[in-house]
Image (cartoon, helix red, strand yellow):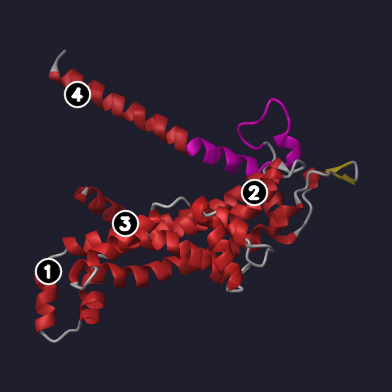
């Protein structure tokens, strides 16, 4: 086999593997998107349609306004598969975004301060404190669920944003500190020393020099914190009781587990749940790519 033919086969195999992976990743998303624009009657027909025959936004209209889609009316009688829980999706989506954004901001501020301290400062117990911080992340969530519930309950923070934010911070902050510490240590220390000689304090060096240089890593760490808190289910279920603070995973679970759930409304709810992470990824795509590539280059 010639070298040119071998390269051609390798390239063809790579493209084939890429297509298979893309299909595996995108097919469920495209199927859900397709289903969300079909009426309930059309979605239940056999054989099913690859594309909507009568596209409708009635499912989304019901979720936001409560207007009953025409596909749910059969000879004037309302069908039972209407999924009342789907009406709580907008409020749950707002709750999830508030919690996720708050956790992300707290990780960026507290994580940057802690990571810079571990990367550049010398203090007693530094190694022990860092190892303890990382060790706390190794505990499975279910192992600390009851203690955290007791603490949040004693602090009167059940069914509040604050309780969820504090718990999510305990799981995301250790990763942020570890991730950013390595980013900070990879930066040339001479730049910071020059700034210190010119009269800058440590905080000025951090915010004016280090963070701009480590912006891709900061965004990558923030993306992890955002996605973790946006998707977190166990503590969102355990620590919330009403739609006042219940997040999207909890409401989606209640929609999906309803035996009379509408398939079309379930699909529309899932599509709405995918929008914020996609917008976040598209908005910070350049920084995310640079931050993750830099992290992989150090491993």
Residue holding disc 4: 7
Magenta stretch contains residue 133? no
Please provide the residue range marked out in magenta: 26-52
Towards the viewer: 59 or 163: 163
Cα–Cα gap, marks 3 and 1: 25 Å
Closer mark to the observer between disc 2 and disc 3: 2
Magenta stretch contains residue 31? yes
Q: Quadrant of the N terminus?
A: top left
Closer mark to the observer between disc 1 and disc 4: 1
Residue holding disc 1: 189
Give the mark nearer the N terminus: 2 vs 3. Answer: 2
Q: Please state the horizontal and vertical placement of residue 218, each as a whole percent of the image.
A: 31, 63
Q: Please state the horizontal and vertical placement of residue 256, each as a whole percent of the image.
A: 67, 44
The answer to whether residue 24 is left or right of residue 123 is right
- Which class describes the residues within 10 Å of circle 2: few (<14), some (14-19), or many (20+)? some
Q: Quadrant of residue 90?
A: bottom right
User: Of the numbered discs in the image, which one, if any, rests on residue 253?
Assistant: 2
Outermost residue to the top:
1
Q: Is residue 77 visible?
A: yes
Residue holding disc 3: 286
Q: In the displayed structure, would residue 114 be above or below residue 64? A: below
Give the mark nearer the N terminus: 4 vs 2. Answer: 4
Cα–Cα gap, marks 4 and 2: 48 Å
Which residue is depicted at the point 29% across and 29% down?
Answer: 14
């Amino acid at each position: 086999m010639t070298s040119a033919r071998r390269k051609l086969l390798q390239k063809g195999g790579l493209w084939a593997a890429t297509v298979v992976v893309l299909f595996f990743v995108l097919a469920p998303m495209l199927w859900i998107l397709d289903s969300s624009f079909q009426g309930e009657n059309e979605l239940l027909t056999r054989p099913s349609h690859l594309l909507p025959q009568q596209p409708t936004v009635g499912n989304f209209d019901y979720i936001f306004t409560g207007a009953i889609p025409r596909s749910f009316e059969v000879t004037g009688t309302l069908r039972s598969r209407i999924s009342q829980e789907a009406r709580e999706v907008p409020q749950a989506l707002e709750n999830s975004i508030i919690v996720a954004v708050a956790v992300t901001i707290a990780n960026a501020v507290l994580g940057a301060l802690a990571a810079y301290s571990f990367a550049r400062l010398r203090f007693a117990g530094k190694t022990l404190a860092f190892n303890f911080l990382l060790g706390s992340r190794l505990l499975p969530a279910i192992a600390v669920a009851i203690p955290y519930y007791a603490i949040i309950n004693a602090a009167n923070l059940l069914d509040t944003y604050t309780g969820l934010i504090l718990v999510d911070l305990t799981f995301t902050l250790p990763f942020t500190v570890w991730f950013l510490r390595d980013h900070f240590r990879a930066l040339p220390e001479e730049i910071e020393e020059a700034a210190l000689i010119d009269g800058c304090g440590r905080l000025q060096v951090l915010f004016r020099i280090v963070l701009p240089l480590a912006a891709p890593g900061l965004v990558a760490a923030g993306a992890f914190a955002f996605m973790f808190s946006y998707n977190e289910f166990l503590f969102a279920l355990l620590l919330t009781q009403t739609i006042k603070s219940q997040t999207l995973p909890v409401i989606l679970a209640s929609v999906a587990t309803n035996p009379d759930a509408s398939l079309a409304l379930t699909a529309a709810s899932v599509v709405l749940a995918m929008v914020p992470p996609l917008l976040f990824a598209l908005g910070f795509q350049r920084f995310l790519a640079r931050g993750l590539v830099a992290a992989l280059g150090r491993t």
